[in-house]
Image (cartoon, rainbow, N blue to C red):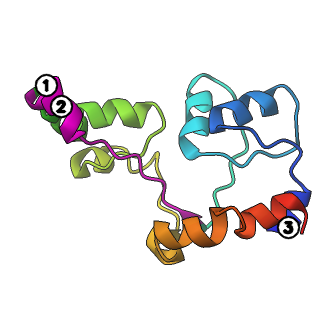
Amino acid sequence: MEAVYRNVESMDKSGRASMAAFEYGVGDVIVTYENELLARVAQGVHYDIVMPDDTILIENPAGVVDVNADAHGVREAAEALVAYMQGAQAQAVFAEHGFRPVNEETAERYASRYKQPSGLFDIGYLGGWEKVRSELYAKRGVWYQVLAGK
Protein backbone atom coordinates (compact mmCIF):
# COMPACT_ATOMS: atom_id res chain seq x y z
CA MET A 1 0.00 0.00 0.00
CA GLU A 2 2.89 2.35 0.70
CA ALA A 3 4.25 1.88 -2.82
CA VAL A 4 0.87 2.67 -4.34
CA TYR A 5 0.32 5.66 -2.07
CA ARG A 6 3.70 7.18 -3.03
CA ASN A 7 2.31 7.56 -6.56
CA VAL A 8 -0.94 9.24 -5.53
CA GLU A 9 -1.06 12.85 -6.67
CA SER A 10 -4.56 13.59 -5.42
CA MET A 11 -6.81 11.66 -3.04
CA ASP A 12 -10.25 13.13 -3.20
CA LYS A 13 -13.29 12.55 -1.00
CA SER A 14 -15.31 10.74 -3.68
CA GLY A 15 -15.08 9.00 -7.02
CA ARG A 16 -16.87 11.93 -8.64
CA ALA A 17 -14.41 14.45 -7.17
CA SER A 18 -11.54 12.27 -8.39
CA MET A 19 -12.99 12.21 -11.90
CA ALA A 20 -13.30 16.01 -11.87
CA ALA A 21 -9.70 16.47 -10.68
CA PHE A 22 -8.41 14.02 -13.28
CA GLU A 23 -10.32 15.75 -16.06
CA TYR A 24 -8.79 19.07 -14.95
CA GLY A 25 -5.36 17.51 -15.51
CA VAL A 26 -4.43 16.16 -12.09
CA GLY A 27 -2.53 12.90 -12.49
CA ASP A 28 -1.73 10.54 -15.34
CA VAL A 29 -4.06 7.70 -14.33
CA ILE A 30 -7.24 7.50 -12.32
CA VAL A 31 -8.37 4.62 -10.17
CA THR A 32 -12.07 5.03 -9.61
CA TYR A 33 -15.40 3.31 -9.39
CA GLU A 34 -16.70 1.72 -12.55
CA ASN A 35 -19.96 3.66 -12.41
CA GLU A 36 -18.17 7.03 -12.26
CA LEU A 37 -16.11 6.16 -15.32
CA LEU A 38 -19.04 4.75 -17.29
CA ALA A 39 -21.14 7.82 -16.54
CA ARG A 40 -18.48 10.03 -18.14
CA VAL A 41 -18.09 7.67 -21.09
CA ALA A 42 -21.86 7.87 -21.63
CA GLN A 43 -21.46 11.66 -21.83
CA GLY A 44 -18.95 11.25 -24.67
CA VAL A 45 -15.66 11.44 -22.78
CA HIS A 46 -13.10 8.91 -24.11
CA TYR A 47 -10.99 6.84 -21.75
CA ASP A 48 -8.62 3.94 -22.26
CA ILE A 49 -10.13 1.60 -19.69
CA VAL A 50 -8.11 -1.07 -17.95
CA MET A 51 -10.08 -3.36 -15.69
CA PRO A 52 -7.96 -5.55 -13.44
CA ASP A 53 -8.68 -9.27 -13.38
CA ASP A 54 -8.80 -9.13 -9.59
CA THR A 55 -11.06 -6.43 -8.18
CA ILE A 56 -13.56 -6.00 -5.38
CA LEU A 57 -17.30 -5.99 -5.88
CA ILE A 58 -18.82 -2.74 -4.65
CA GLU A 59 -22.44 -3.14 -3.60
CA ASN A 60 -24.87 -0.28 -3.07
CA PRO A 61 -27.64 -1.62 -0.82
CA ALA A 62 -31.08 -0.15 -0.39
CA GLY A 63 -33.32 -0.81 2.56
CA VAL A 64 -36.03 0.52 4.79
CA VAL A 65 -35.05 2.06 8.11
CA ASP A 66 -37.76 0.57 10.30
CA VAL A 67 -37.85 3.24 13.00
CA ASN A 68 -38.09 6.08 10.45
CA ALA A 69 -40.60 4.37 8.16
CA ASP A 70 -42.84 3.57 11.11
CA ALA A 71 -42.46 6.99 12.75
CA HIS A 72 -43.52 8.73 9.54
CA GLY A 73 -46.14 6.18 8.49
CA VAL A 74 -44.43 5.48 5.16
CA ARG A 75 -43.46 1.83 5.52
CA GLU A 76 -45.64 0.62 2.66
CA ALA A 77 -44.30 3.27 0.26
CA ALA A 78 -40.69 2.69 1.39
CA GLU A 79 -40.95 -1.06 0.89
CA ALA A 80 -42.58 -0.51 -2.51
CA LEU A 81 -39.70 1.76 -3.54
CA VAL A 82 -37.08 -0.81 -2.53
CA ALA A 83 -38.98 -3.53 -4.40
CA TYR A 84 -39.25 -1.31 -7.49
CA MET A 85 -35.52 -0.55 -7.40
CA GLN A 86 -34.79 -4.27 -7.60
CA GLY A 87 -37.06 -4.78 -10.63
CA ALA A 88 -36.06 -4.90 -14.28
CA GLN A 89 -37.26 -1.38 -15.17
CA ALA A 90 -35.33 0.44 -12.43
CA GLN A 91 -32.32 -1.83 -12.87
CA ALA A 92 -32.18 -0.84 -16.55
CA VAL A 93 -32.03 2.82 -15.51
CA PHE A 94 -29.20 2.04 -13.09
CA ALA A 95 -27.38 0.07 -15.82
CA GLU A 96 -27.66 3.01 -18.21
CA HIS A 97 -25.98 5.20 -15.59
CA GLY A 98 -23.01 2.93 -14.96
CA PHE A 99 -24.24 0.66 -12.16
CA ARG A 100 -24.11 -3.09 -12.67
CA PRO A 101 -27.63 -4.50 -12.56
CA VAL A 102 -28.39 -7.05 -9.87
CA ASN A 103 -31.68 -8.13 -11.38
CA GLU A 104 -30.90 -11.32 -13.34
CA GLU A 105 -33.07 -10.42 -16.35
CA THR A 106 -31.52 -6.96 -16.65
CA ALA A 107 -28.00 -8.27 -16.07
CA GLU A 108 -28.42 -10.59 -19.07
CA ARG A 109 -29.53 -7.65 -21.25
CA TYR A 110 -26.44 -5.64 -20.26
CA ALA A 111 -23.93 -8.52 -20.19
CA SER A 112 -21.89 -7.10 -23.08
CA ARG A 113 -21.51 -3.75 -21.32
CA TYR A 114 -20.49 -5.18 -17.96
CA LYS A 115 -17.74 -7.73 -18.39
CA GLN A 116 -17.24 -9.92 -15.35
CA PRO A 117 -13.63 -9.76 -14.08
CA SER A 118 -12.22 -13.26 -13.63
CA GLY A 119 -11.08 -12.56 -10.08
CA LEU A 120 -14.05 -10.57 -8.79
CA PHE A 121 -14.28 -10.88 -5.00
CA ASP A 122 -16.38 -9.39 -2.24
CA ILE A 123 -15.52 -8.08 1.22
CA GLY A 124 -15.71 -11.62 2.61
CA TYR A 125 -12.45 -12.43 0.81
CA LEU A 126 -10.75 -9.85 3.03
CA GLY A 127 -12.33 -11.23 6.18
CA GLY A 128 -15.53 -9.18 6.20
CA TRP A 129 -16.26 -5.60 7.15
CA GLU A 130 -15.45 -5.99 10.83
CA LYS A 131 -11.94 -7.21 10.09
CA VAL A 132 -11.34 -4.62 7.35
CA ARG A 133 -12.51 -1.80 9.61
CA SER A 134 -10.35 -2.89 12.53
CA GLU A 135 -7.19 -3.85 10.62
CA LEU A 136 -7.24 -1.43 7.71
CA TYR A 137 -9.26 1.66 8.64
CA ALA A 138 -9.03 1.90 12.44
CA LYS A 139 -7.17 4.82 14.02
CA ARG A 140 -3.97 2.75 14.13
CA GLY A 141 -4.80 0.48 11.19
CA VAL A 142 -2.70 -0.22 8.11
CA TRP A 143 -4.13 2.68 6.09
CA TYR A 144 -3.62 5.10 8.98
CA GLN A 145 0.01 4.00 9.18
CA VAL A 146 0.49 4.53 5.44
CA LEU A 147 -1.02 8.02 5.59
CA ALA A 148 1.09 8.86 8.64
CA GLY A 149 4.20 7.81 6.74
CA LYS A 150 5.14 5.07 9.19
Mark 3 or mark 2, which has the lower sequence index?
3
**Residues at marks 3 and 1, CA–CA distance in whole angstroms:** 48 Å
**Closer to the camera in the image, 66 or 8:** 66
Q: Residues within 10 Å of mark 1 (few under 14, many from 20)?
A: some
Q: Residue 11's image quarter?
A: top right
Boundaries of the magenta span: 55-76
State whether residue 122 appears in this view. Answer: no
**Residues at marks 3 and 2, CA–CA distance in whole angstroms:** 44 Å
Tag 1 near tag 2, CB within 8 Å: yes
Residue at image position (58%, 69%) is 134
**Which amino acid, by three-letter code, is at mark 1?**
Val
Residue 53 locus on image (x, y percent): 60, 68
Residue 27 locus on image (x, y percent): 88, 41
Query: What residue sits right under mark 1 in the picture?
Result: 74
| Element type at mark 1 | loop
Query: What residue sits right under mark 2 in the picture?
Result: 69
Query: What residue sits right under mark 3 in the picture?
Result: 2
Query: What quarter of the picture does the N terminus occupy?
Result: bottom right
